[in-house]
Image: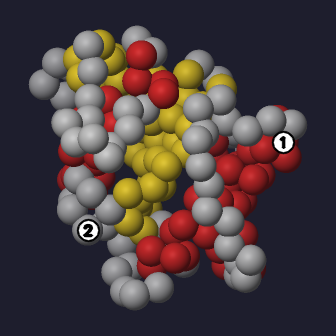
């Protein structure tokens, strides 16, 4: 399973919006993170603590804006959105085929599980997870690779 990243960002947040990215008010996400249709797993940290793991295929800025200040009734705000500063690490999965969505969702679930096992609790703001019963060795290896990078192993 091909992955790119992580790309890491320090975000300053306030009033339901991004105030700065890596200390710049006009900061940008890297091109791969901004691409619509590319599957991504993102890890949100507050200090050294992993507080949330998500996935998306949207432009990442759009995804954040929807989570920080949802405009539609069926969208829920990020529970971590009230924090003033977070670090976000993004891994992209450039292969686009019918299976990619399920593969990325399986990696996301395995990653959350590995963190739960390591920390003896779920990430603080994790609201849901979609477990897959037939996770492959490749998906497990990918989740472990991301886990190791998060924790500097």
Q: Which residue is mark 2?
A: 37
The secondary structure type at the circle numbered 2 is: loop
Tell me which residue sits at (42%, 16%) in the image: 82
Quadrant in which the C terminus is drawn: top right
The percent position of residue 111, horizontal first and vertical second, equals: 67, 55
Tell me which residue sits at (34%, 37%) in the image: 67
The percent position of residue 86, horizontal first and vertical second, equals: 45, 23
On the rendered structure, is 84 left or right of 131?
Answer: left
Mark 2 vs mark 1, CA separation in Å:
32 Å
Q: Are marks 2 and 1 in contact (CB under 8 Å)?
A: no
- Which callout, 2 or 1, points at the residue further toward the start of the chain? 2
Tell me which residue sits at (85%, 46%) in the image: 117
Question: Does residue 50 appear anywhere in the picture?
Answer: no
Query: Callout 1: 10 Å neighbours few (<14), some, many (20+)?
Result: few
The label on residue 118 is 1
Residue extending farthest to the bottom is 98
Of 138 and 133, the residue lying toward us: 133
Image: 105 above or below 13: below
On the rendered structure, is 102 left or right of 59?
Answer: right
On the rendered structure, is 74 left or right of 143?
Answer: left
Image: 69 above or below 107: above
On the rendered structure, is 116 left or right of 41?
Answer: right
Question: Does residue 1 appear anywhere in the picture?
Answer: yes
Of 27 and 63, the residue lying toward us: 63
Tell me which residue sits at (74%, 77%) in the image: 133
């Amino acid at each position: 399973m091909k992955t790119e990243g992580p790309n890491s960002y320090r975000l300053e947040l306030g009033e339901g919006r991004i105030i700065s990215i890596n200390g710049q008010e006009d900061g940008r996400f890297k091109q791969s993170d901004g691409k619509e249709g590319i599957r991504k797993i993102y890890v949100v940290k507050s200090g050294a603590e992993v507080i949330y793991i998500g996935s998306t295929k949207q432009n990442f800025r759009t995804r954040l804006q929807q989570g920080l200040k949802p405009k539609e009734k069926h969208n829920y705000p990020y529970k971590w959105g009230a924090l003033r500063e977070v670090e976000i690490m993004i891994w992209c999965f450039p292969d686009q085929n019918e299976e990619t969505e399920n593969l990325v969702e399986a990696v996301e679930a395995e990653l959350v599980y590995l963190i739960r096992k390591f920390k003896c609790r779920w990430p603080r703001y994790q609201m849901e997870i979609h477990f897959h019963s037939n996770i492959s060795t490749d998906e497990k290896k990918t989740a472990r690779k991301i886990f190791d990078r998060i924790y500097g192993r």
